[in-house]
Each structure stands twice: as C-alpha cells, then as structure tokens.
C-alpha cells in the first residue's frame, strides 16, 4: 500500500474496484488543522471527472498501468486487432473499449494502448489525424443557412461538418478529441 505522498499526475488509483487517473493534485497545509491532499480524478473507463480529498498520510491503492505503442491492423467482427510494435504480439480489443476512437482509426496507424493486468483499458489517439473525404454534396455558392458548412463522410465512415469548398477526395485534418474539421492537408 502506498500513501498520499506517492500521488503524482498520471498515477492510476484503485478506488472501490474502479480505476481513476490523477489529473491534478495539490498538497495543502492549512494554518489550522491537519494537512490534506486535494485531487482531481478521471475514471479510466467512463471518463467521468471527480474531486476527492485525502488526509495526509492516508493509505491509497496505486495500480500499475502499462502504456505501450500498438499498430492498428484491422477490424474483426466486434473487435479491433492491434499489434504491439515492440514484440509483434497481437491483441483484440472490444469495440466498447475502443469507443469513439473507432471513428478515426486507419489501418497501420500507431496508437497508445493502456493495459492493467493484461486487460486493455483505453486507447489514446494522436491529437489529430488526416482523413480523406469519401462523400459530400457539392457546396452551393450563396447557401449560408448553416454557417457555410455541409456534412461530409470520411474514409472511416465518420460524418462531420466541413466548409462548402471541400470536395470528394480532399484530405482533411480532424481533431480526434472533438471530431471537428481543422483544415485541408496538401499532399
């Protein structure tokens, strides 16, 4: 068992059987009363963020989370197959674990997979990816009913809003956190 003195950003705590990632922490020593540690925690699975306060010296349970680079290979039914880039082992991660990241996964793309005791917890994508537009309606000049944007489908099947001048075959940069259009990419 560790104590609150071992809390650092990025450490994963096991609280009531759930894994929580420490986003922020602050050791506080008020003028009156005992010292304490104020933390902001993010649930590894659900993404929920909570604030939790511990008395200084309290016992906590730190989990070992292994983050390694994997290469996305292909989709297999309800799972996604990834290959460890260091030892070439392949793992299948269920679509519930991959979540919305599936909208931005391209074959041979490198991602970071976090595992705990051999179980995949989540995958981290790069902040942005380059995707090709596979379908969009032609933009009509003068159509400003929707702030100069139109729906477009990218090669992964994800649908997003793009400016009117973007056409089929255009490569665009997409923010993987929000799914927003960031700009065109010239080859």
Image (spheres, helix red, strand yellow):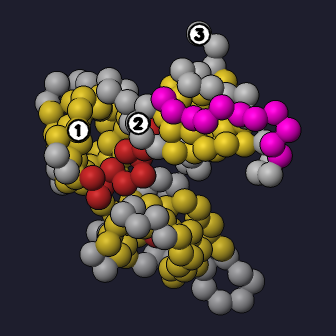
On the image, which quarter does residue 111 sit in?
Answer: top left
Q: Which of pointers 1 and 2 lies earlier in the amino acid sequence?
A: 1
Q: Which mark is residue 113?
A: none
Callout 3: SS: loop
Q: Residues within 10 Å of mark 2 (few under 14, many from 20)?
A: some
On the image, numbered disc 1 is attached to which residue? Answer: 75
Q: Is residue 169 visible?
A: yes
Q: Is residue 142 left or right of residue 153?
A: right
Whether 136 is among the magenta residues is: yes
User: In the image as oriented, which residue stretches furthest toward the top?
Assistant: 187
On the image, numbered disc 2 is attached to which residue? Answer: 156
Q: Residues within 10 Å of mark 1 (few under 14, many from 20)?
A: some
Quadrant of the frame with the N terminus: bottom left
Q: In the rendered view, would you say 97 is above or below 61? A: above
| First to last magenta residue range | 134-144
**Of residues 18 and 102, which is closer to you in this image?**
102
């Amino acid at each position: 068992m560790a104590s609150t003195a071992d809390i650092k950003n990025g450490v994963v705590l096991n609280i009531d059987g759930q894994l929580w990632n420490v986003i922020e922490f602050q050791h506080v020593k008020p003028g009156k009363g005992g010292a304490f540690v104020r933390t902001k925690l993010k649930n590894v699975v659900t993404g929920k963020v909570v604030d939790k306060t511990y008395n200084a010296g309290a016992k906590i349970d730190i989990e070992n989370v292994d983050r390694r680079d994997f290469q996305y290979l292909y989709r297999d039914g309800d799972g996604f197959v990834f290959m460890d880039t260091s030892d070439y082992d392949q793992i299948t991660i269920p679509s519930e674990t991959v979540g919305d990241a599936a909208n931005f996964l391209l074959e041979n793309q490198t991602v970071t997979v976090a595992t705990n005791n051999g179980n995949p917890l989540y995958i981290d994508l790069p902040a942005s990816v380059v995707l090709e537009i596979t379908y969009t309606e032609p933009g009509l000049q003068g159509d400003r009913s929707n702030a100069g944007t139109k729906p477009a489908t990218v090669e992964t099947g994800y649908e997003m809003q793009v400016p009117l001048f973007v056409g089929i075959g255009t490569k665009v940069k997409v923010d993987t956190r929000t799914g927003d259009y960031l700009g065109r990419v010239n080859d």
